[in-house]
Amino acid sequence: TIKHSSIEDYKQPYMSFQSVLITWALLLFTAFASVKLELHLEASIIVSSIRCVVQLSFLGAILLPIFNAKNPLLVLCYMMFMSLLAALEAVARPAYTYDEMFLQVFCVMTGVQFLTCCYMLYAVLGVGIEAQFAIPIMGMLLGNSLSGVSLSTSTVVTELAEHRGTVEHALSLGASRWEATKELLVKSATLGLTPSINQISVAGVVAIPGMMTGQIIGGASPEQAARYQIVLLFLINASTTTAILAISSLAISTVVDGRHCFRNSLKPARKVRMSPSTLLNALRDWMVARMSTMFGSG
């Protein structure tokens, strides 16, 4: 059973949409500086900020009926949807790809983060599949592991594609596929885990993490907020490590088969990829071109 601890007589300030617009106006200064310095980032700044408002407003709108429904099946479906988007984003970044990459990344990220989320919900909090807890925790697990998974996957496939001769030479000398690829596996895991480790090491010293900040603003006791954040950081690190090692191992076992032979499965990623940000990126590029033409002609 959770013991809710909050600051007495605390009332969270109401955040109106006018307040959002006031803070958004500050970004216009950044866009203006980009124009004056010819950074050509003004369109990206404006589109990214609009995208942020639309996405988070949409998220808030659809989460309310999910919370009110109190239906575990609906919560699970939304968690699967979150995993799908995370997997699409993760496979959109590497310079090389193979046919099974998306399925592997989706299955690993969904399985690892879902089990980690369930561990938090049942073993730590004891609340079960409740939307109020399950969706935010799943989102934080996916969001924080995405960069590490994407970076490690990109490192593995790039090393296999661009240093194929080194791996094949080791295989020809009798090394197994795991012996021949041990160095690149270590390299990819190190690169992928470094952001997560840094996040743990500086938490509470350099910056107050997001979950703790949100709980304190919401009126929770700083002591309880700190404990929630500590638990979450540990779970993020553990789930990220598991996902990175699993996806990297699957990538290696796919490219180098069980007979320790190099398969011709790697290919350059297409320039236009199916990712959640494809349409908005195209809109941003169009706005950059239009604004460059306008300011260039002026």
Image (spheres, grey):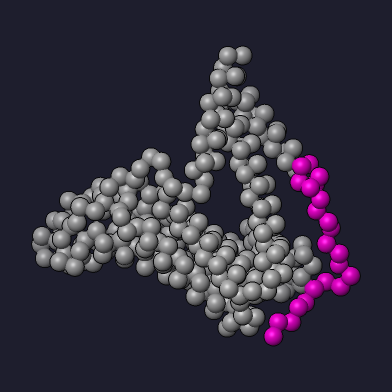
Task: State the residue at coordinates (51%, 36%).
Answer: 282
Q: Is residue 74 placed above or below 52 in the rendered structure?
A: below
Q: Is residue 115 placed above or below 217 in the rendered structure?
A: below
Q: In the displayed image of the protein, which residue is found farthest to the top?
A: 298
Let me know if residue 13 is in the magenta part: yes
Q: In the figure, is residue 111 to the left or right of 59?
A: left
Task: State the residue at coordinates (61%, 31%).
Answer: 42
Residue 113 placed where, x, y %?
50, 69
How many numbered marks does the figure carry? Answer: 0
Q: In the figure, is residue 173 to the left or right of 61?
A: left
Front-most of 294 and 227?
A: 294
Task: State the residue at coordinates (56%, 24%).
Answer: 290
Residue 114 placed where, x, y %?
51, 72
Residue 228 placed where, x, y %?
65, 72
Please tell me whether the stretch drawn in magenta is mainly helix, strand or loop.
Answer: loop
Q: In the figure, is residue 17 to the left or right of 39?
A: right
Residue 169 placed where, x, y %?
14, 56
Q: Quadrant of residue 118?
A: bottom right
Quadrant of the drawing holding the N terminus: bottom right
Q: Is residue 12 placed above or below 56 in the rendered structure?
A: below
Q: Quadrant of residue 259?
A: bottom left
Q: In the displayed image of the protein, which residue is found farthest to the right?
A: 9
Front-most of 158 and 208?
A: 158
Let me know if residue 199 is in the magenta part: no
Task: State the residue at coordinates (37%, 52%).
Answer: 154
Q: Quadrant of residue 225?
A: bottom right
Quadrant of the drawing holding the C terminus: top right
Q: Which residues are magenta?
A: 1-22
Residue 231 visible in the snapshot: no
